[in-house]
Amino acid sequence: MSAGVELDHVTVRFGDFTAVSGATLDIKGGEFFSFLGPSGCGKTTILRTVSGFLEPSEGKVRIGGKDMAGIGPNRRPTALIFQNLALFPLMTVAENITYGLRVRGIDKDMRAKKADELLELIALPGQGNKQMSELSGGQKQRVAIARALAVQPQVLLLDEPLSALDLKLRQHMRNELRIIQRMVGITFIYITHDQGEALTMSDRIAVMSDGVIQQVADGKTIYDEPATAFVASFVGENNPFAGTVAQADGSSALIETKFGRLRGRNPRGLRAGDKAILFVRPESIRLGAGATDTTLSSAVKSVAFEGNMTHVYLEGVGKKNITISVGRQGTTSIPEQGQVAAISYDAALGLALPEGQLARE
Amino acid sequence: MNSRLIVLVVPFIVIAIFWLMARREAKLSHDPTHKGYFERNGMTLGILFIALVALWTLFLVVLPYLYMVVESFHPQLPPSKRGGPEDVLTLAQYQSFFVQPVGGGLNVTHIGAFVFSIIASIAVTALNFAICYPLAFYMAQSGGAQKVRLLMLALIVPYWVNEILRAFSLRLLLASKGLINQMLMGFGFTDAPIDFLGANVGLYVGLSYAYLLIMVFPLYNAIESLDKNQIEAARDLGAPWWRIHKDVVIPYAKPGIASGCTMVFMLSAGSLAAPQFLGGPRTLWFTSVIYNFFFQNFNWARGSAYAFILLAACIALVMLMLRLFKVSLGETIK
Ligand SMILES: Nc1ncnc2c1ncn2[C@@H]1O[C@H](COP(=O)(O)OP(=O)(O)O)[C@@H](O)[C@H]1O
Ligand SMILES: [Mg+2]
């Protein structure tokens, strides 16, 4: 069984400090939902509020439509997988997995059966009697998942569970988590600062910054239609051109930047005179001039050849570079270092957004 | 040969055996890059170091105890007869604990005092643990840093007051005309004063209090290193608070618990002042019996025999407990 999770204007404060402010979300039952944001933005705080370790200072958390106020973590239909896993080192693998059943007073035979079932699910059959110290990082990871699934939660909460693993294992576990989620069919709420993880696994993603939810959408929308300057700069590579809106209509805006007037789409309804940032992704820029309002030129600082791609870095504003990623199909020759090069993009691939905080590099 | 001389020789023999073993070890697993002790320090300095350490341990640690062991196997004799024909090895002092030397009946008084001391020490240890565990858990896991520092201070400062003052102030509190009885009678809970001291309440409270810190710190150390997430994980999986302690905290803190309990038990069983000042009039603590042999009867032989009986019993009991709770001795001193 799975249950949806609703956050209704949830604000969490620690003293004077607001860690989460006004989070409003509706996570559907059975959804793989991710919170994505840089470290310290309040992701763990949200998860702890859903699991019941924290009470919201304001607002409500509802699970399966039921208000969770005053219900402790041991009585919520959620299970949490901790950032450091928090497996019990003095218990065996099977004892760890069935601990939640033991405290529910389920008898030994039943527990053994359930342990075997779950060990099968996490591809560790017959290893129930091992000590935790005998397992590798990836295996511990899976035991933590099994321990949480054993209590048949309606919502599984995962706090950066893959961050301790090496890259290869991490990519493997992404698939595995997705498969497990489809198999058990419950709601997964997944927390990560790694956009790759969020984009590959999730049905929907909430991008967070400084305790504020910036955008909630599926991965493709987050990448192609970022709603704020923060999302545009945090998810994927992007080149920001800050400036003031010179002309605007319903569909596009012309922005006065350090590199001249540049055009982009205008989904947020900017008006002439507004402060704005035009974003163009490195893979959307090509070498060579195009239409006047989508062409700019700058000195080449360096060129990095990366096999399938060549990255060209041009002088930007201040210390920031303009990055272009050129594929191999193009016949255009790569300019030399120091040369001033003209570059251009399709107006449809430029995106004008209201001025806002950018993600730190 | 005089047995007291043997005692002097024994340590040297032991040292020699160890030295030979070390030599053999060094020969068997010879490591050419490893510089020997004498190579590193030079012959003169090396010998000097060893001699100093050896003298220290020999005269201040090993010999006094060995001397007491030997003494306990001798009869009590006036100085003039020591070393004479009557000065033979004997088990009489140990026997006298069980069977009265005069009359031959079972030595009920001393066996009683012994059993009482052991049981009371176990009770004190249990009481102490019951007080200290919640305290240590609070300090290690849930208290804010500021409050914990204050609590720590409140625990330590009373120990600046000397033991006699502490004991007698406790007496004042518990005496039949003491503060507690006055209050109980004032509020009408009882008509006659309750004999706290006669019921050894003072003894238990005093001993528990005296060794509070000795219990708190090992517990605190053990619980402090427990990852908070483990407690939360157990809670998240549905465990009520008492199960979290039973399944997660106590198993983790077991070495610390064993260490604290062992020390409190040993110290209580061997304590002298608190039982004398706070015990009821009919209470005889075993260490008082030993004390009297040494300082009132000048019977060192029997006193030391009794002391070793107590020591052996305590060690045996502690070992049994460690075995029972599956803690190794090494873990308790980590
Ligand atoms: N118990 C707490 N007391 C005070 N501040 C906290 C507490 N927990 C978290 N914070 C603060 O709240 C912010 C968000 O923390 P967290 O939710 O852990 O971030 P994330 O998981 O996104 O890295 C951080 O600035 C952190 O310092
Ligand atoms: Mg976190």
Image: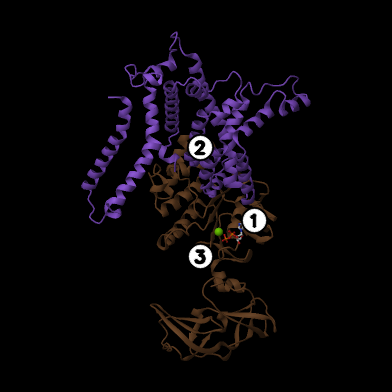
Chain colours: A brown, B purple
User: What is the three-letter code of the residue carrying label 1?
Assistant: Glu
Task: From the viewer's perspective, tell me whether residue B235 is left or right of residue B174.
Answer: left
Q: According to the image, label 1 marks what residue?
A: A6
Q: Nearer the viewer, residue A210 or B115?
A: B115
Mark 1 or mark 3: which is in front? 3
Residue B173 image position (x, y, % from top left): 69, 29
Q: In 3D space, how far apart are the residues under numbered discs 1 and 3 (Cα atoms)?
A: 24 Å
Same chain for mark 1 and mark 3? The answer is yes
Q: Position of residue A303 (x, y in %)?
A: 43, 83
Mark 2: amino acid? Gly
Q: Looking at the rendered structure, which numbered label has been put on residue B260?
A: 2
Q: Residue at x 49, y 46 (%)?
A: A147
Q: Residues within 10 Å of mark 2 (few under 14, many from 20)?
A: many
Can you say whether A311 is above or below B22 in the image? below
Amino acid type at mark 3: Asp
Disc 2 sits on a residue from what chain? B
